């Protein structure tokens, strides 16, 4: 690949194939974070497990991604973004096939862990690939489109799962990834550009030494501390309601390991986190706003199915129909956000969007509108529109504010923020469910109130940014 590809992007059919390959990857990786939630009752019955174990089918996938996103994104700068993406997608597709064929819970969990490894590789280099594929004048629209695809995938996951489960079984939630993966990998192999500088693929002593050196540049203590931090945080959140002492100790230990990780990253010559960017106030606020928004969405997507089906007494089909209002208006709002940002400060557009999300979730939780499917679709539509106004402009700030040579690290940070936010929101709602005496009914209301609060925190953080 010549230098012109880096600066001028691709053109024509090659651009289309490369973009479609990237978008399919993002859809598959993000859908698998949320698409199984409606299938958990079927999994518990067919595999003979309790509901608390079934939740780990969702959680393990996100946990593995969180642990690996930062080191893989750092490594992708050296081994090549195209390679990382295609190798990751290949593993993800094979693991999806295995998950669909899994005869028991243990084999399903092994498959989900392998899926998480592949998804981490795919998601870690999306930002870098976008910068290689698109020209400078198309960059803003490309970032907006990517952010919209991710947000719609997360928002549409529960509804899509409900539609599939009405006609097929849970195995198809995994098997659908296989043909999509094959199509995306073929497109990506022929269309995605290589890095100008990347490690060669040869089986000689010099090349193997270069690969060992590249892997050794990942700081081992930092990686271990970040992995232990995520594991302890998840275990603490999962056990604090039933085993307060164990849960509290786990959360305290997680805080300690988190502090140690950040402290180590500040001193290591090759940090996994872009500490120089995070030390800038505006950039840190942008990341905080993104985290709060995805935590709000994660909390809402766990609470809403219980709210609609348990409290509102809607059927699975009715709840799926109601929830489609969110991704539909999200898709419609994203291009509007791009035009608004040409006239209004991005921080104000983002704050307005998160304010809409917070207010609408509050309306749903407090039952200010009639308890009917038609009435609930209105605030859910506003939720989607608000998230659409926020997501694309905020992602543009995250990517465009960083230099091109840091795109791998920035891509990892962006993905970690998204997945960690989703997982944090979902875990907090799970804790509210466990603390609720009536289970899903009252817990879902509290979960929606929590989601509204998190969106409000994000809106306030966005307002404090400079126009």
Image (spheres, rainbow, N blue to C red):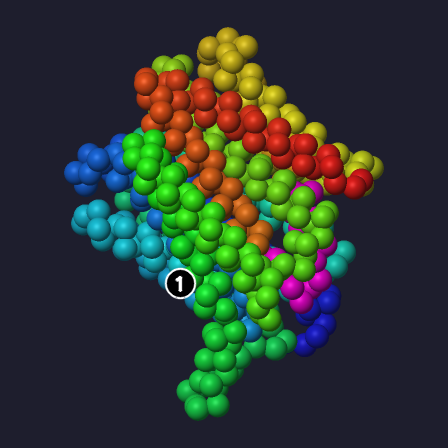
Q: Which residue is depicted at the point 50% across and 8% down?
A: 370
Of residue 82 and residue 107, the one placed in the foreground of this image is 107
Number of numbered tags placed on the structure image: 1
State which quadrant residue 328 falls in.
top right
Q: Which residue is depicted at the point 82% across and 37% down?
A: 343
Q: Is residue 260 magenta?
A: no
Of residue 261 and residue 108, the one placed in the foreground of this image is 261
Magenta span of residues = 392-411
Quadrant in which the N terminus is drawn: bottom right
Query: Left of 3 or right of it: where is 259?
Result: left
Q: Which residue is depicted at the point 63% across and 35% down?
A: 458
Q: Position of residue 88 (x, y in %)?
A: 43, 62
Q: Secondary structure at mark 1?
A: helix
Q: Which residue carries the number 1 mark? A: 90
Q: Residues within 10 Å of mark 1 (few under 14, many from 20)?
A: many
Q: Position of residue 361 (x, y in %)?
A: 55, 22
Furthest-right residue in this view? 343
Q: Position of residue 381 (x, y in %)?
A: 57, 24
Q: Can you say whether 288 is above or below 368 in the image?
A: below
Q: Position of residue 437 (x, y in %)?
A: 32, 18
Query: Left of 240 or right of it: where is 138?
Result: right
Q: Which residue is depicted at the point 50% across and 17% down?
A: 365
């Amino acid at each position: 690949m010549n230098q012109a590809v880096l600066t001028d992007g691709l053109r024509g059919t090659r651009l289309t194939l490369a973009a479609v390959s990237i978008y399919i990857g993002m859809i598959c990786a993000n859908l698998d974070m949320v698409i199984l939630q409606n299938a958990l009752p079927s999994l518990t019955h067919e595999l003979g497990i309790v509901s608390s174990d079934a939740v780990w089918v969702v959680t393990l996938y996100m946990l593995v991604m969180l642990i690996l996103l930062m080191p893989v994104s750092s490594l992708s700068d050296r081994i090549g973004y195209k390679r990382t993406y295609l190798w990751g997608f290949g593993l993800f597709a094979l693991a999806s096939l295995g998950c669909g064929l899994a005869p028991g819970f243990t084999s399903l969990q092994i498959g989900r862990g392998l899926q998480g490894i592949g998804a981490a590789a795919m998601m870690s280099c999306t930002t870098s690939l976008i910068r290689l594929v698109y020209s400078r004048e198309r960059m803003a629209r490309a970032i907006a489109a990517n952010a919209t695809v991710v947000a719609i995938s997360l928002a549409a996951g529960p509804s899509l799962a409900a539609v599939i489960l009405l006609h097929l079984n849970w195995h198809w939630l995994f098997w659908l990834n296989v043909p999509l993966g094959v199509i995306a990998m073929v497109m990506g192999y022929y269309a995605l550009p290589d890095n100008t500088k990347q490690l060669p693929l040869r089986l000689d002593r010099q090349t193997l030494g270069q690969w060992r050196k590249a892997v050794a540049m990942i700081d081992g203590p930092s990686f271990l501390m970040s992995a232990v931090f995520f594991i302890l945080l998840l275990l603490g959140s999962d056990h604090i309601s039933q085993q307060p002492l164990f849960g509290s100790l786990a959360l305290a230990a997680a805080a300690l390991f988190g502090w140690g990780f950040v402290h180590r990253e500040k001193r290591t010559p090759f940090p996994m986190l872009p500490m120089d960017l995070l030390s800038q106030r505006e950039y840190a606020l942008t990341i905080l706003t993104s985290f709060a928004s995805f935590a709000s969405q994660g909390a809402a997507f766990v609470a809403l199915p219980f709210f609609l089906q348990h409290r509102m007494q809607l059927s699975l089909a009715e709840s799926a129909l109601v929830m489609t209002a969110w991704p539909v208006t999200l898709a419609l709002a994203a291009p509007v956000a791009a035009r608004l940002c040409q006239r209004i400060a991005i921080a104000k557009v983002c704050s307005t969007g998160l304010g809409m999300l917070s207010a609408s979730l509050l309306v749903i939780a407090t039952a200010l509108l009639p308890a009917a499917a038609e009435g609930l679709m209105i605030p859910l539509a506003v939720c989607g529109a608000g998230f659409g106004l926020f997501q694309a402009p905020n992602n543009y700030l995250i990517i465009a504010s960083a230099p091109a040579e840091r795109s791998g690290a920035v891509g990892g940070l962006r993905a970690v923020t998204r997945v960690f936010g989703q997982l944090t929101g979902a875990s907090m709602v799970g804790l509210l469910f466990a603390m609720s005496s009536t289970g899903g009914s009252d817990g879902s209301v509290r979960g929606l109130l929590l989601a509204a609060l998190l969106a409000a925190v994000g809106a306030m953080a966005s307002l404090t940014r400079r126009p």
